[in-house]
Structure formats: structure tokens, C-alpha cells
Amino acid sequence: MKQIGIVCFGILSLCLFYGFGMGRPPAIFNNKDIHASAVEDSPFFLVISDIHLNTCRKVTDVDGDTDPSSWNITKTELAKLLDKKPRFVLFTGDMPAHHADVKAECNCDKHPVDHFRRRDYDTVLQNFYALLKGRDIPFFFVPGNNDVATGDYGKFTENNKNVFSDVKNMYPTPTLNTGVSKTHYPYIDSLNSEDCYYSVCIASNLRLIVLNSIILCKSEANTYSQDDGFKELDWMKTELQKARNKKQSVYIAMHIPPGEGGNNSKKNPGKALWKKSLVNGFLSSTDTYNDLIKGIFYGHIHTDECRFLYNKGGDSIKSVAFSCPAITSYKHGNNPGFKMMDYDKATNSITDVITYYRDIDIPTGGWQQYSYSQIFGCQNGVGFINALMTKANKDLTKISGPEHAIFFLKRNAGKNPEDYPEPEEMKVIWR
């Protein structure tokens, strides 16, 4: 008889929102000294996501994609942190503007939408090259649903062309400052160049697994088959076993996370982001290799959140996945943001999460930051993740933080559970 159980994702969100009735971020978010010594004291890496650059856009708009001026402000802040020598930079997807923003801002009577979007992602990739190549900092690209030459949610490579094909200096690998020779770290250990999923040995004790989550997602525009998804998950399991054999810790990166989008309330019900059978396969592997996995990172959601992965019984949190907030404010009205991840070099455990964000109303920058350890009262250091999971296990309920900036969700466990029902797609049956 097969053992079955229920697995779900708890979602914790720190919304860097300008809109949705929030006004300014709460006071705790404005403390510029909250993590002043982190760069000097701890090894770290950077996570950036959802730039959605629109090279046609002339002005900053809280409901529009990223204009060149705003992107330049972000690059200036990134350059300061890059001078502090992060271990690597992880970009979790979506370089070009959304179709609607291109149509609103560009002369699409003269050129098709894809002409402008190609210019957008060429610009972003060349910018990353300029920022990172001379500093000799590894860069790892994760494909987003917009990073497709043939349209959103399409196949990464069509007719032997993809977003890297026209970008000199980068083609054909989705990395910078990373080789293929296994005599020098970091190196690409396994690469599916057509579909853009790969693994990198960053150090002798650390492996990064990059997934193409478009293959796994539930979108009707997804042109990949379910068999393609099983093939990718089988590959991931092979890479996890390699890590076990080599006594390596593992980070997993993707664009679209498993679980649901939206906030799962009646007003904004969540929708399953992955095909259920593929969620099952992913969670089965992350449970089996849970002792190796030190961090899961994703984008797509555009807000600052983390997702808790439960065990087979659905009663205990086993892993934490961290989102990266978006640079764009398109439709969400959020302040642009990105993340610094502190980690312990010996164990590769995440020791704190620091979110940098910019008040979009301040044209000259206005960068601020906050740390998870201080906001959630979890001691930073090697016990940070366990402290975060323990706190979530005890108090994973909706709370009314300052201006509703912080909220927790757990299946049927809020102050008003009828307002936050467990959606059917949250249930995952193990096989």
C-alpha cells in the first residue's frame, strides 16, 4: 500500500508595495542601519529578478515597466555591492518589458513588439557583462517566462535561436566568469543548452541547480509537454544524487515557484503555478535530499516573500524558498528591490536575508534595506533558517502588521480561516 500525505506551501510576504493602500513602507523598513555591517562581516551573494526593462520608456511610472533611468539607478547601487565581492550573482529571470508596456511606449507601427523586446534583453545582458566581467564575479542566468525570443512561455530555443544568440560575449552559455573545465571553480557540470537548465559546481562543497520552470508551469501558453517536465525533474534528481556522492550542499534556482500565485484570499484567489504531477515530482526530490538543500530561490511573483515546504504529513516545515522582489513596478506598484543572501562558507547555510529597495517616488535613488533576522526576530547565523522555520511552525497565521506590510498564510490556520481557505491546488498527494 502506498503511503500518501498532504504537502503544501505556507507563504510569508513582505510586500514592498507603493500601491494596494500601503502608502510608504512601515517605519521598520526605513532603518538604513539595520544591516550596516553585513557586507563586511559575512560572505554573501546577490539575487536579482524581473527587471522588465523597456528601452522605449521615457519616464518612471509606478504602474509601468522599468525605464532606462530607473535601471541606471539600480545598476549604480549594484556596482557598489559588487565592489564588495559577492560570491556570485544569481538572476532569476525576466529581462524584457511586458508586451502591453512595449505596445504603450514603443512605435510598434514601425517595428514589431519582439524587435523592441530583443533590444531590451540584449541591453540587460550587455549591462550585466559590463558590470561583472572585469570584476571576475560569476553570473548565473535563470530563464524567465518572458526570456523567450518567440513569445512568453514559449520554448527557450526555436530554430536554433535563443536570447543569447545575438549577444556577443555570452553565447552559448547562460553564465559569466564560469568555465567548463573541471579543474577550476566555478564550472558548468551539466548543461541542457536548448532548454536552458544546468548545474554548476561553485566550489568543492557547493552545487547550484538551475531549473527552467517554464517547462514545469501550468500556463496555457506553455508549449512544453508534461514529458519534457518529467525529463527535467529526472535530470534534477540525478544532479542531487551527484551532490550527495560528492558531499556537496545544494542551492536550487528557478523563475516560477511551485505553489500558487496571488495571495489566496477571496478577493485575489491564488492559482496553481505548476502542473500538479510535476509539483509532486519536485517535492518528492526536495524531501529526499532535504539534508543537502541549503536554499531555494525564485522570482516571478514581484514581491518579497518566502515559501515554506512541508513534509509528507503536512504538519512540519522542512525547507524554505526565498523570492526576489522585482526591479519593475509593472501593475503591482511595488518599490524596486533585490536581495543579498548572507551565508556560512563552511556549511553554505543561509545566515540572513537582506532586501534592498528603493522608494520609487525618489528619482535620485533613495535605497533602503531591512533584514529578515531583525523583522522576524530570528537570530542571524547558522541557525537562522531553523529559527525562521520554528517561528513559522508556531505562528504561521495572518497578522495585521504595519499597514498590512507583513502577512503569513497557512492552510486553514488564519484568524479568519474562512477568508483564507486552503485552495484545492495547494494539496499535493505524494506517490
Image (cartoon, helix red, strand yellow):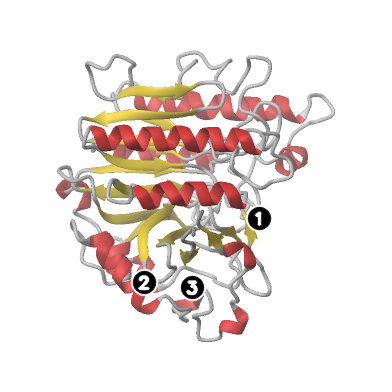
The amino acid sitting under disc 2 is Ala
Which residue in the protein does label 3 denote? 410
Which residue in the protein does label 1 denote? 331
Q: Nearer the viewer, residue 233 or 54?
A: 233
Question: What element does badge 3 sit on?
Answer: loop
Q: Quadrant of residue 228?
A: top right
- Mark 1 vs mark 2, foreground winner is 2
- Contact (Cβ within 8 Å) of mark 1 with mark 2: no
Question: What element does badge 2 sit on?
Answer: helix
Which residue in the protein does label 2 denote? 392
Indicate which disc, 3 or 1, sits on the residue closer to the N terminus.
1
Q: Is residue 146 left or right of residue 10?
A: right
Residue 19's spot in the image, x, y percent? 60, 65
For this orientation, the residue located farthest to the bottom is: 415
Indicate which disc, 2 or 3, sits on the residue closer to the N terminus.
2
**Residue at the spot 37% in from the left edge and 57% down from the top edge:** 320
